Amino acid sequence: MHRLLSEVLHAEGRVCVYGWPDHEENSLFAAALLSRVPGLRVTLLAARPDAARGYLDLIGSNEAGLEVVAKNSLAGLLRASAAEVLLFTHGLYGSPDLTERKLVINLWHGYGPKANDNATFSARIPFSVLTCNTPVWGAAAARWLGARRARLRRCGNPRQVAFSLPAQPSALSRLGLEGERFVLWMPTYRSANGASGPVWRDSADLSTRVEAAGRDPVSEVAALAEAAGVRVLVKPHPLDSARYDRAGLRVITTEEILQSGMTLYQFIASSAGMISDYSSVWVEYLDLDRPLVLYCPDLSDYSAGRGFSEPPMVELAAGLIVQSSQALRPFLAALANGRDWGRKHRRQAGENLGTQPGMVRGEAFTGAVLEEIERHRSLRTRAAGALTPPRFRI
């Protein structure tokens, strides 16, 4: 139905944005930024419009001209089918190929080191343009999604704009963190918990893995952090089945963060440093230029299981990777004493990935989309002209 309606409906200047879930900040910021552009009429589709409006309030961008409509409604279907521009993170209405008629932009949900291929999914989402922060791993995602010819726009992920919108002290206070200096541990999930439906396993959970010392990596990190006097908070992926609280570490959920009055990326920007691994979040964290370490005790197992995008992270970010908990000591000691750690390696990783720290303030994303709109209109005008029957003089 979406494909058929798109053949007959067309409203120039109409933009439709959809992200999953409703609090996905790439879609929230994309809709908010584009709604400020004169001449564009922007609709944000959401499973729960009231909740989406609340999330827009958190980023201070509930624009009067930004319409929020239920995705599973006739109005939502008509808005998307008539739109000149579609932007989404995981596809929309079955993702028919509309690239000849519309400008279809994939915002995706992050570009990290792990292989995009997953036997549980066989995603093929037609799109014309892919916005990204790293063209290296962005290109890998485009290939996996079956859009090898898509144009890559290195304008950052829209949600990185949140890094320049610090969380209010009151929001941190609700989490008991006002004035607290903390390190945020954001590991990728090795085994899915089934919250989104499918269940799969890329490698053993960190909470059940046993290191040489006889303890699991989570317990090791908790012990080292306590010894160093550094507060480590864990923000697991919503699909993660691992248990981080058993070691005494505090676990912060997405729901807690939103209820406190800030978004996830505003919370990330409140941290003094980050521990990550195969998650895409650390590529965005490079934009903050703060201490970052990639703790990968299961590097060989993960490589043999899920695997990595090419070029692999061991080549692009070698200086940030540690494979044993004891190798975390210098990182934690530096944070405890207010010193930086790994600046040279961070910047080398950024250069290797083609990121541009500090670039993402909204203008780059908006400018890239407007350029693509003009390009798309020009191509459509030429195509329409080529189909015009020749005129003959009699």
Image (spheres, helix red, strand yellow):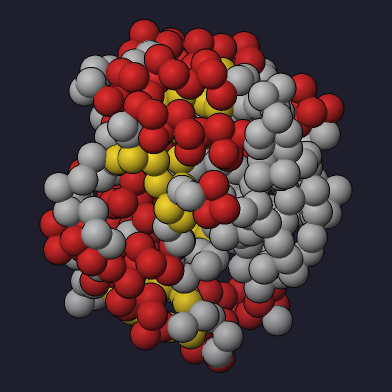
Residue at 37% across, 85% down: 50
Q: Nearer the viewer, residue 13 or 130?
A: 130
Q: Quadrant of the N terminus?
A: bottom right
In the figure, is residue 74 to the left or right of 185?
Answer: right
Q: Is residue 322 above or below residue 78?
A: above
In the figure, is residue 26 to the left or right of 262?
Answer: right
Q: Nearer the viewer, residue 379 or 123?
A: 123
Q: Position of residue 305 (x, y in %)?
A: 82, 34
In the figure, is residue 366 to the left or right of 79?
Answer: left
Residue at 25% across, 45% down: 270
Of all residues shown, which one is farthest toward the bottom? 74
Q: Quadrant of the C terminus?
A: bottom right
The answer to whether one can see residue 287 in this image is: no
Count of numbered badges drawn on the protein: 0
Residue at 14% across, 63% down: 170
In the figure, is residue 102 to the left or right of 356?
Answer: right
Q: Position of residue 97 (x, y in %)?
A: 70, 60
Q: Position of residue 55 (x, y in %)?
A: 33, 70
